[in-house]
Image (cartoon, helix red, strand yellow):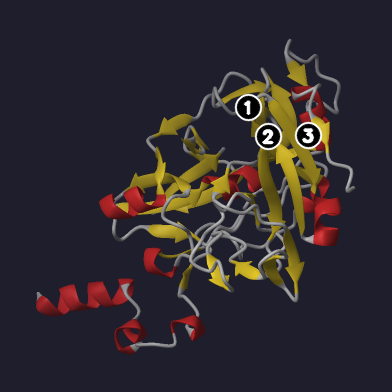
Amino acid sequence: MLVLITSACGAISSGESDGAIGSDDEIEPEVFGPTSVVAEPDPDLYNPVAAGESLPDNYQPLAPRDAIFPVYEPSFVAAESSPWADDIMVVGVYLEGEARAYPIGFLNAREIVVDLHRGIPTLVTW
Amino acid sequence: MVHRREIDGQVLAFGNQGDLYLNAMTWFDHGTGSVWSQPFGEAILGPLTGSTLELLPSTLTTWESWRDTHPDTLALNAFSTRSGFGLDLMTIVVEIGDEQVAYPVELLRERGVVNDVVFGLEIAVVIDPRDEQRWSVFSRNLGNTIAELEVIDGELTDTLTYTTFDPVRGLGTGGPLAARALGHLPGFTAFEWEFVNLFPDGRVWDGS
């Protein structure tokens, strides 16, 4: 039983971090992921707007598809490796026992994160 | 918002349609090309019209508070994800009181920082000299002095006191006012044509 618990912990925390004292600036944080990899869309993919479908009221064509490029390959770092200031706002998601945080400053710029959260396909948008 | 991107057991990838429906964001799915409304999570054009995505629980809070309640949380590796997108095409918008100003990123990049006054408040819009995808809006009011910021030798520097500041957090890093910090102000990104639509009376900074 003990062995099982130990190995389970080992998979989560990197063994190296225990001995790392000082020179924090030099340590590259461990990166988890990409948690999801999505191919970029086929340029020939059907586009109802370009095809001339009648648009609903209050529909305003604006920019080309993916002009604001989504995050198709998100990756993560542990909380202690994150450079964020305490007071920034984040979208927090807790699913299947795992928490993930997405800063809204970044979501402002990219608008869409296509993720896979412990097996659940998620779409984080702002 | 967080949605489960799955319809009848079929997982869908989504991209940014780039249009507005009821003044809100639209997506397209990579499977059928249908167009979706973000706030409704519902397809409004194309083969999947009428389908809706399940909304999943999520929280909007500060990083500190989220970490307190979820110490094992993962943090999006936000500033090293592969970027195929040009922030260059965007403007950084500052809205204070009833005054809105858009700063085209392409012009802003040329000098790294712009000092301005919006709604009577001295502000600065800063591109991180170490990572051009990162930007911040700060108050230049340091109490008894108003900073005049420039990027000098790669450092965000107040040219009146030669204090340097962290371009992301605003904390003083060296010089006589190193104990001070530039206060963060909210800003957001928008295309210039979006800005002009949204704020017809707004001002677009022309680089002067």
What secondary structure is found at the residue carrying circle 1? loop
Give left or right: position of A42 versus B35.
right
Depth order, front residue of A77/B29: A77
What secondary structure is found at the residue carrying circle 3? loop
Q: Which residue is mark 2?
A: B120
Q: Which residue is mark 1?
A: B97
Query: Residue A84: percent from the left, percent from the top?
Result: 48, 59
Amino acid tagged 3 = Tyr
State the residue at coordinates (76%, 24%): B199
In the rendered structure, the residue with mark 2 lies on which chain?
B
In the rendered structure, the residue with mark 1 lies on which chain?
B
State the residue at coordinates (34%, 49%): B66
Q: Are marks 1 and 2 in contact (CB under 8 Å)?
A: yes
Depth order, front residue of B103/B33: B103
Amino acid tagged 2 = Gly
Query: Residue B182: percent from the left, percent from the top?
Result: 56, 55
In the rendered structure, the residue with mark 3 lies on which chain?
A
Amino acid tagged 1 = Gly
Alpha carbon separation for disc pair 3 and 1? 43 Å
Mark 1 and mark 2, same subunit? yes
Q: Is residue A107 visible?
A: yes
Q: Which residue is mark 3?
A: A46
